[in-house]
Image (cartoon, grey):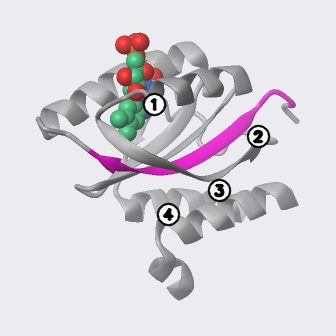
Amino acid sequence: MNKDLAYISYCSQAHLPSGQTDLDRILDVSQRNNQRDQITGLLTYSGEVFVQFLEGPPQALHRLMSRLRGDPRHRNIIILSEGVAHERMLAGWDMELVTRQEAHLALREALGEAGDYAKVIALSSLLAKLDPDLHRGG
Ligand SMILES: Cc1cc2nc3c(=O)[nH]c(=O)nc-3n(C[C@H](O)[C@H](O)[C@H](O)COP(=O)(O)O)c2cc1C
């Protein structure tokens, strides 16, 4: 078990005046920084709303959240879930932009492999927030 691992998920209201260009810049910087900071995760973008899931060393996550809170490309950050992680759910994902459905599938897969109760709870609550309809249906 890795004692120095935390996770956090949030949603926010996107504000991307330059659309795809803004999104590409966010992903470039995120992939570079996250590799450096040992952060992995995923980002979904609906055109209006971001949902991001992040996991990594608590200090690095804390610093990233401060940068995110000061980023004008989104507003009204709402934390969906956070806690201590026992193992990485998305090892190798330095920051992937995925559809909600893809995010849902990845998290469901992680849920299927989840070995401990805390992880099951974290994943279940994230899944429910990511897509309540799909979650009820599946
Ligand atoms: C929705 C969204 C998600 C982001 N995700 C990350 C991320 O995972 N990692 C990261 O380093 N920056 C991310 N950023 C960018 C940060 O807010 C910030 O601009 C960046 O970390 C600054 O990096 P720099 O100091 O290397 O320029 C994200 C920004 C937005 C709007």
The magenta segment is 3-14
Q: Is mark 2 on a helix, strand or loop?
A: loop
Residues under labels 2 and 4: Cα distance? 18 Å
Residues under labels 2 and 3: Cα distance? 11 Å
Q: In this view, does 102 lie above or below 83?
A: below
Say which residue label 2 marks: 87
Q: x%, y% of residue 1?
A: 88, 36
**Which residue lies at the image location 32% right of the left edge and 30% below the top edge?**
27
Q: From where the camera sits, is residue 31 visible?
A: no
Q: Is 9 colored magenta in this rendering?
A: yes
Q: Is mark 1 on a helix, strand or loop?
A: helix
Ligand 1 visible in quadrant: top left
Residues under labels 1 and 4: Cα distance? 26 Å
Q: Residue furthest bottom?
A: 137
Q: In this view, does 133 lie to the left or right of 65?
A: left
Say which residue label 1 marks: 68
Q: Is 77 colored magenta in this rendering?
A: no
Q: Which of marks 2 and 4 is nearer the N terminus?
A: 2
Q: What element carries label 4?
A: helix
Residues under labels 3 and 4: Cα distance? 9 Å
Q: Which of marks 3 and 4 is nearer the N terminus?
A: 4
Could you tell me if the residues under marks 2 and 1 are in contact, i.e. CB atoms within 8 Å? no
